[in-house]
């Protein structure tokens, strides 16, 4: 009975390498009936650490209001919309309570 040599890379080492360098998985799935394409799904998956993603220019989550609620508030303040809403609420405070 032969014994296989144990791998020198542990799961933690492999995971660290993947997150440090990044991995891209890409694929297309098409659904056709009688040579008529009904649906196409394009799948692009990028697996990396947040730092690696930032270095590659992928930092969409920093401005997404779902992931960074303060970003939405800052955007409202920059456009002046927050001030306009506050002014409207100050003009008719009873209406604000009726809308809730």
Image: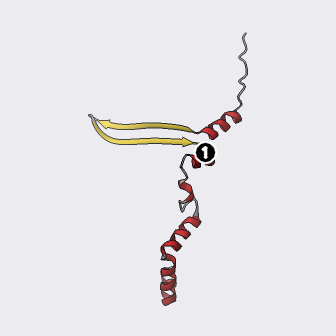
Task: Please tell me how many numbered marks the rendered image carries.
Answer: 1
Horizontal placement of 33 versus 54: left or right?
left
Which residue occupies the foreground of this view, 74 or 4?
A: 74
Residue 54, placed above or below residue 74: above
Horizontal placement of 95 versus 50: left or right?
left
Q: Position of residue 74 (x, y in %)?
A: 55, 69
Secondary structure under badge 1? helix
Which residue occupies the foreground of this view, 55 or 18?
A: 55
Identify the residue at image location x=70%, y=34%: 13
Question: Quadrant where the N terminus lies?
Answer: top right
Residue 33, placed above or below residue 61: above
Residue 69, placed above or below residue 53: below
Q: Position of residue 27 (x, y in %)?
A: 44, 36
Identify the residue at image location x=58%, y=61%: 68
As drawn, the residue found furthest toward the top would be 1
Q: Position of residue 24 (x, y in %)?
A: 52, 38
**Residue that carries the numbered disc 1 in the rendered image:** 52
Q: Residues within 10 Å of mark 1 (few under 14, many from 20)?
A: some
Identify the residue at image location x=56%, y=65%: 71
Colour convention = secondary structure
Identify the residue at image location x=63%, y=48%: 51
Horizontal placement of 2 versus 49: left or right?
right
Q: Position of residue 5 (x, y in %)?
A: 72, 18
Residue 20, placed above or below residue 57: above
């Amino acid at each position: 009975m032969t014994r296989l040599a144990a791998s020198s890379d542990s799961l933690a080492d492999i995971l660290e390498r993947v997150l440090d360098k990044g991995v891209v998985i890409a694929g297309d799935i098409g659904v056709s009936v009688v040579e008529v394409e009904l649906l196409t799904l394009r799948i692009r998956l990028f697996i990396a650490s947040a730092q690696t993603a930032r270095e590659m220019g992928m930092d969409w989550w920093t401005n997404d209001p779902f992931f960074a609620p303060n970003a939405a508030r800052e955007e409202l303040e920059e456009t002046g919309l927050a001030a306009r809403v506050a002014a409207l609420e100050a003009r008719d405070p009873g209406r604000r309570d009726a809308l809730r």
